[in-house]
Amino acid sequence: MGIESLDQKIAKQQEKLNQLKAQKQAALAREKAKQKVQERKNDTRRKILLGSYLLKKMEDEAEKQKILAGLNEYLTEDRDRKLFGL
């Protein structure tokens, strides 16, 4: 085997290595995107469950007043405050 053919083999292996690295990067990016989507779904589910819990608690008038008092301090935007009659 001549040096030239060895150089060609090295070049081919280097190109294959670069392709594998690119595949690895793409797989990592897909996994990261998948995790981000799942985190968003989990966050949305938490918000829905918390909202449902608070709505159930607001059936009791005393609890309703406590919750609305807390919301009155927390909410700053007019459109949000209107939702709760604040």
Image (cartoon, helix red, strand yellow):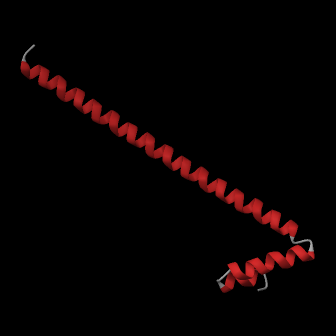
Q: In which quadrant will I find the N terminus?
A: top left
Which is more toward the observer, 1 or 73?
Answer: 73
Q: Tell me which corner region of the image, top left, top right, bottom left or bottom right, holds residue 69.
A: bottom right
* Lateral position of residue 72 relative to residue 13, left or right: right
From the viewer's perspective, is residue 63 above or below residue 38? Answer: below
Q: Residue at x 91, y 71 (%)?
A: 59
Question: Residue at image x 71%, y 81%?
Answer: 73
Q: Which residue is located at x 64 percent, y 83 percent?
A: 77
Closer to us: 18 or 57:
57
Left/right placement of residue 46 relative to residue 17 reads right
Tell me if residue 72 comes above or below residue 12 in the rendering: below
Which residue is found at the position 77% from the left and 59% from the top? 49
Task: Tell me the quarter of the image containing the C terminus.
Answer: bottom right
Q: Position of residue 39 (x, y in %)?
A: 60, 53
**Residue situated furthest right in the rendering:** 60
Vertical side of 23 occupied by 39: above or below: below
Q: Position of residue 26 (x, y in %)?
A: 41, 42
Give the quarter of the image for residue 79: bottom right
Q: Is residue 10 left or right of residue 33?
A: left
Where does residue 51 sit, x and y in percent of width and height?
Answer: 77, 66
How far from the left and from the top, in percent, is residue 36?
Answer: 54, 52
